[in-house]
Each structure stands twice: as C-alpha cells, then as structure tokens.
Image: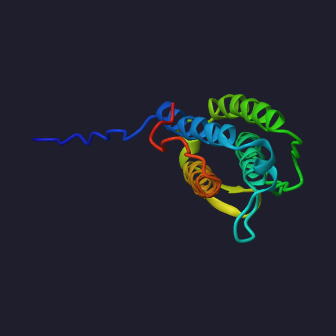
Amino acid sequence: MTTTATITKQFMTSDQLLEHWQGHRNLTRRVIEAFPEKELFEFSIGGMRTFAKLACELIGIAGPALKGIIDRNMDDYNEEGFKPETKADLLKKWDEETEVINHYFAQISEERFQETFNLFGQYEFPVYQNILYFVDNEVHHRGQGYVYLRALGIEPPFFWERF
C-alpha cells in the first residue's frame, strides 16, 4: 500500500508580511519627509487631497483596523480623526502608528488570517485580504505623493528602497 503525503509549503510567513508592509510604511514616511512643510498641507493636483490628508487616511486605517480585527469590533471608519498642524506632528503620529501596527499584528494567529472579518462594517473579506488592502491603499496614495513631488520639482525616493 502506497500513501502520498501532501505537503503544503507556505509562501510567506506572517512576519514576512509585516516586514513587507513596514517596508512600504518606511518608504511612505520618506515621501512625507520629502515634502516642503507648506506643500505637504496645501499642494494638490486636479482636486485630489493634499498628501497630508492622504497620510492621515493611512494613519486612520491601519492601526485602528488591526485593533478592530483583534477586538472583533466592526465600528465605522472615522474620517475625522487625527489632524496634524505640522510635518513633525504627522511624522510623530506615523511612527506611533507603526508601533500600534506591530502590537496588534503580532496578536493575529495564523488561523485568523483566513477568517472572514467585516472591517469597519463594510469590507467583508478574509483578514489577510484586508491587510493586503492596507498595503495596496498605501501604495496607491504614495503614488499620488510621487506625482505631487515631481510636480513640485522634487525627486521622490526610489520606490524599491523600502528599508
């Protein structure tokens, strides 16, 4: 009698996923740093939000969403959250949220990544897809920041230098 064992190889560990995400966050932080103070809060193209407002959206999603996943809380997304007055305020909050992300991400078990969760009461997907959305959303908004920087005559950081 012959038996065949099925071996499942994991593509990526949760630690690698967090490292990937934090690499993107590190690059986005460098984009924030590249903006002159005034333009960070005032410059936009074609009616899009300023990069400060885009960064605040990212701050308002990641940490609170992970906390919601851990607490199984489906409260609505709060768009009226953090409102920085300076680039230093924004960078300080960015760094604080990095620690919030690390704290809550570490509490997600491997099984929970596959569990469906209704994020903010409106995005019902497996937890891993919600996390990938956070990364995708950040890359999308960072791309807008790159356009803004180039329009201002500022060379943005290389997109592949995430650490």
Residue shown at the point (70%, 66%) measured from the top left: 45
Q: Foreground residue, 34 or 2?
A: 34
* Name of the residue lying farthest toward the front: 153
Residue 117 rendering spot, x and y as whole percentages: 66, 54
Horizontal side, residue 95 vs residue 30: left or right: right
Of residues 154 and 29, the one drawn nearer to the viewer in this rendering: 154
Colour mode?
A: rainbow
Relative to the observer, which residue lies in front, 131 or 69?
131
Residue 129 image position (x, y, % from top left): 55, 54
Relative to 132, 1 lies left or right: left
Q: Is residue 26 above or below residue 72?
A: above
Residue 143 in which image quadrant: bottom right
Vertical placement of residue 77 versus 82, above or below:
below
Out of 19 and 157, give the one closest to the viewer. 157
Residue in the image at 85% along x and 39% along y: 86
Q: Position of residue 52 (x, y in %)?
A: 77, 49
Up/down of 44 relative to 107, above or below: below
